[in-house]
Image (cartoon, helix red, strand yellow):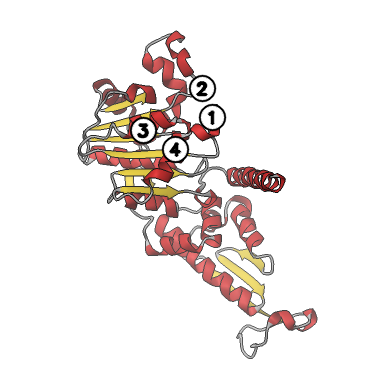
Amino acid sequence: MDKIDRDHKGYREDPSERPAEARVMTERVILLDEVDPVVMLGPNNRLLDQIRGYYPKIRIIARGNELKCIGEPEEVSVFTDRMTELIDYYRKYNRLDEGDLERLLLDDDHMRTAASGDFEDALVFGTNGKPVRARTVNQLLLVKEYNTNDLIIAEGPAGTGKTYTAIALAVRSLKNHEVKKIVLTRPAVEAGERLGFLPGDMRDKLDPYLQPLYDALHDMIPFRKLEQWIEDGTVQIAPLAFMRGRTLESCFVILDEAQNATVSQLKMFLTRMGVSSKFILTGDTTQIDLPRRSESGLLQAMRLLAGIEGISIIRFDERDIVRHRLVKNIVRAYDNEEKKANEELKKSQ
C-alpha cells in the first residue's frame, strides 16, 4: 500500500524508477478561498471531471471548499501550482468554463497572458451589460495589432472569435469617435448573380448571408440604436460587390469570410481604403467555397502582403476556439483528415 508523506522530504530519486509498491505519495489540500465551489468545479462537478482528465495520475477529492489531491510529490506540486493559477484566474475574470480550463491547463502562453491581467480590459459592454473582452492569446493579439496597423488579416478556423473581436473593436472605435462609420461586408458566394431575382430590397435579399454580422452587432448595440445607425448609414452592411467604386474614409471596415473573395474582388476591396480608415479581413482558408481553391484572394493576399509595414497577419488556431468544446474536436478531425490526404498525394507523385 502506498505511503503518504505530507512533508515532501527525502525523495530525490526519479519516481518512475521506483517499483509501484515502493512509491511515496504525498497529499495536499487546496482551499477554494473567495470562490464559489459550484462555479469553480462546475455543475455536478463537470469541470472537476475535466480537470481529473488532465491529471490522471493524481487522485482528486472535492469536499466543500477544499480540494484534496494525492499523488507523487512532483505531480502534486505541478497540479497545486496550476490550481492556484486557476483560482487566481477565476477571481480576476469572474469566469471559468470548459474552454478556459483547456486553454489555461494546456497552453502556457495563455496562462502567462491571463496571469498578466491582459484579458481584463473590456472592448465594449454588451446590450446585457456584460463586458466583451478578448478571451484568447490571438484575440488579444488582434486587439494590440489594431493599435499599430491599419490593415489586419485574421485567418483561422471557425469559432475562434475573429469576426466577433473585430466587430467589438469597430463598435468601440465608433463610440470613441475614432471613425465615423462601420462598414461590414461579405462575399455572397452562394447567391451569385441571383440576388436580383430575390424579393425585397437589398437588405432583404442579403440578410441570410449577413445574419452573423447582425447577430454580433445586436450583442453590442441596443436594438433601437442599431436600427437608427443602419438607417442613417453610420453602420452599413453590404455584399462585397457593392464596394466597387467607393472610397472608404474614416471608416472601420470588416470583410468577413474573405476566403471566398476572388483575387480580383480582394484587390478591388483593398484599394477602397481611404484616409483614417481601418480594415480587418477575417477568413478560414480551409473553408473556401469558390469553384477552384486557387482562386481565393485571401491566400494570395496573405502571401503578397506579409512583411509590409502597417499590415499585420494573425493566424488563429484551434487553441482560440471559444464555441462548444466539440467544435475544437471537429476542427482537429478535419485537419487530420486533410493532412493524411496531402501526405498520400505527395507519396503518389
The mark nearer the N terminus, 4 or 1, is 1
From mark 4 to mark 2, how far is it between C-alphas?
18 Å
> Along the line of sight, which residue is nearer the eye, 204 or 96?
204
Amino acid type of the residue tagged 3 in the rendering: Lys
From mark 1 to mark 3, how far is it between C-alphas?
18 Å
As displayed, is residue 232 above or below residue 182?
above
Q: Residue at x 63, y 51 (%)?
A: 44
Q: Residues within 10 Å of mark 3 (few under 14, many from 20)?
A: some
Residue highlighted by disc 2: 190
Q: Residue at x 28, y 44 (%)?
A: 150
Residue highlighted by disc 1: 289
Residue highlighted by disc 3: 267
Amino acid type of the residue tagged 1 in the rendering: Asp
Q: Residues within 10 Å of mark 4 (few under 14, many from 20)?
A: many
Q: Residues within 10 Å of mark 2 (few under 14, many from 20)?
A: few
Q: Residue 271 appears at what percent x and percent y?
A: 30, 33
The mark nearer the N terminus, 4 or 2, is 2
Marks 1 and 2 close (CB-CB < 8 Å): yes
Residue highlighted by disc 4: 298
From mark 4 to mark 1, how far is it between C-alphas?
12 Å
Q: Residue 272 appears at what percent x and percent y?
A: 28, 31
